[in-house]
């Protein structure tokens, strides 16, 4: 799995390139298939990449929607240096730009874990993947076979999809990481208007390509057999193999090939009618699949048939809708790579002292305490992402919180309200009291059963009503002192609903 991820090399989605260049086995004497497969063979490299969004607002939208679109357009990603080591380890440094704030980050991936950190974090974060790697090993999955399947799939797709209407090849000299490199530039475009016809042509070609389909199914069989076997009898039923043993590769592939061809031919029989029905029932689709939706790709391939630069732009036209304040949205990605199959060592990051994301989900307080309060990361998490925000509503006859009024004091079950505000609740049996730890500040509150005195962050506070336990074993405390001690505000509306908010 790790090596499979590594082979993606943080580039723009490879499938987008395949879809737009498919069918172009030879253009002006240039073999596109070999170039794409050559990229799969890269074992080590260094690269960089940028990604940005641009949303175009629809007419007459609200100021709130305009603000949201402004946030979308403020986002960009710059991965300044990716290192792919020949053993599959990857490291990357870069930055996220959001609302003109620069948020540098570092990532490292090896066979043990994914480790990452951002500027302002006191400790890195990590997610262990060693157990997953062991599971893959036990199931017998072979990363070499995965790469071979990638090549087979590339050949299959490229062979069967027709050329888009715009495709050009030209010799160029371009700078790659400061070095002038002689390359072949492939430029291609496809519009949403072309997509249905391209898909239909692809399906027709697949239906006739018995040799290619056999090769693809053979490759998938070799790679996936361990997983299929682990599914037992259910795999036979799912694949419709009947009495054919899974180990009988030739017969299994034949049955699957016949099933795929039958399914593709069935789709082709109703393709045009179903497309017309889709346009009729979902007229908005005509906007998305129009000439205004366009994918444009530039690939720069060196003499070794390695893709050294990529420029990809996708613009999607969107239908007019009260629920969608956008006229269109576009994505732009650029990347370049160098030191292909050279000596590359990924920048290792230690997991010592790092926060383990696999053990328990981090609470908002745990997350925020790991960042410097003056850092951009802290500001984005709190002000823009609002991860500390909480809102609770307690109805007068609420069947979850079960509030009761004693005198002039509203009492609620401590555990339910405290935990819904992310606080930690512990029982101190020796002293018959409950200890509540505020998630955001870490300060402690203690409520003793039968007492009208609470201790809030070391200070004794007199309560208007004593703490008590109801017939169901729930400990009731005054709502206001609990909520305000947990950094939230409390209001009551004219209908008697209690509104609790924490910023």
Image (cartoon, rainbow, N blue to C red):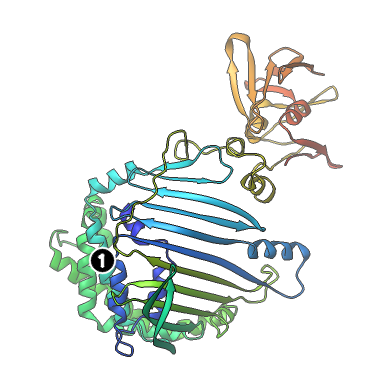
Residue annotated with mark 1? 149
Residue at the outermost front position? 179
Identify the residue shown where x is 18% and y is 66%: 252
- Residue 302's place in the image compared with 443, above or below, is below
> Is residue 303 something that shows in the picture?
yes
Identify the residue shown where x is 68% and y is 35%: 399
Judging depth in this view, the residue of 205 and 4 nearest the camera is: 4
Residue at the outermost top position? 430
For label 1, the SS is helix
Q: Position of residue 33 (x, y in %)?
A: 29, 78
Q: Where is residue 170 in the image (x, y as percent from the top left)?
A: 39, 87
Image quarter in which the C terminus is found: top right
Judging depth in this view, the residue of 406 and 53 nearest the camera is: 53
Q: Is residue 250 left or right of residue 210?
A: left
- Residue 99's place in the image compared with 493, above or below, is below
- Residue 95's place in the image compared with 290, above or below, is above
Identify the residue shown where x is 59% and y is 18%: 427
- Residue 53's place in the image compared with 29, above or below, is above
Judging depth in this view, the residue of 376 and 465 nearest the camera is: 376
């Amino acid at each position: 799995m790790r090596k499979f991820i590594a082979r993606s090399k943080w580039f723009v989605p490879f499938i987008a390139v395949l879809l737009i260049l498919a069918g172009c086995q030879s253009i002006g004497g240039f073999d596109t298939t070999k170039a794409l497969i050559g990229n799969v063979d890269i074992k080590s490299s260094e690269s960089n990449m940028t990604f940005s969004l641009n949303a175009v607002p629809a007419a007459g939208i609200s100021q709130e929607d305009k603000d949201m679109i402004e946030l979308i357009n403020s986002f960009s990603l710059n991965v300044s240096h990716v290192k792919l080591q020949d053993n599959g380890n990857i490291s990357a440094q870069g930055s996220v730009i959001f609302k003109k704030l620069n948020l540098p980050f570092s990532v490292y991936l090896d066979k043990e874990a994914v480790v990452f950190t951002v500027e302002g974090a006191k400790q890195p974060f990590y997610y262990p993947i060693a157990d997953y790697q062991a599971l893959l090993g036990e199931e017998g999955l072979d990363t070499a076979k995965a790469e071979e399947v990638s090549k087979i799939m590339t050949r299959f797709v490229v062979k069967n999809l027709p050329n888009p209407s715009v495709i050009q090849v030209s010799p160029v000299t371009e700078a790659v990481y400061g070095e002038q490199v002689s390359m072949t530039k492939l430029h291609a475009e496809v519009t949403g208007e072309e997509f249905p016809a391209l898909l239909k042509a692809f399906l027709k070609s697949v239906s006739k390509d018995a040799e290619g389909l056999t090769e693809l199914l053979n490759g998938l069989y070799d790679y996936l057999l361990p997983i299929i076997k682990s599914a037992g009898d259910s795999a036979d039923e799912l694949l419709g193999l009947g009495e054919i043993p899974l180990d009988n590769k030739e017969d299994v592939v034949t049955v699957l090939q016949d099933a795929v061809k039958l399914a593709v031919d069935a789709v082709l029989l109703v393709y045009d009618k179903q497309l017309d029905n889709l346009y009729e029932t979902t007229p908005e689709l005509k906007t998305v699949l129009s000439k205004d939706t366009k994918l444009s790709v530039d690939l720069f391939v060196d003499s070794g048939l390695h893709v050294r630069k990529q420029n990809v732009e996708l613009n999607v036209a969107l239908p007019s809708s009260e629920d969608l304040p956008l006229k269109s949205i576009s994505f732009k990605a650029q990347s370049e790579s160098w030191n292909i199959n050279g000596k590359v060592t990924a920048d290792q990051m230690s997991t010592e002292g790092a926060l383990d994301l696999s053990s328990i989900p981090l609470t908002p307080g745990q997350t925020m305490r790991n960042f410097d309060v003056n850092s951009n990361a802290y500001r984005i998490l709190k002000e823009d992402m609002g991860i500390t925000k909480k809102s609770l509503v307690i109805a007068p006859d609420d069947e979850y919180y079960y509030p009761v009024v004693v005198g002039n004091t509203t009492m609620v079950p401590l555990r339910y309200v405290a935990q819904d505000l992310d606080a930690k609740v512990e029982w101190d049996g020796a002293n018959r009291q409950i200890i509540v730890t505020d998630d955001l500040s870490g300060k402690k509150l203690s409520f003793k059963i039968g007492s009208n005195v609470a201790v809030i962050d070391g200070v004794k506070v007199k309560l208007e009503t004593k703490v008590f336990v109801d017939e169901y074993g729930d400990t009731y405390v005054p709502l206001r002192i609990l909520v305000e001690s947990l950094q939230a505000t409390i209001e009551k509306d004219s209908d008697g609903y209690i509104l609790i908010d924490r910023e």
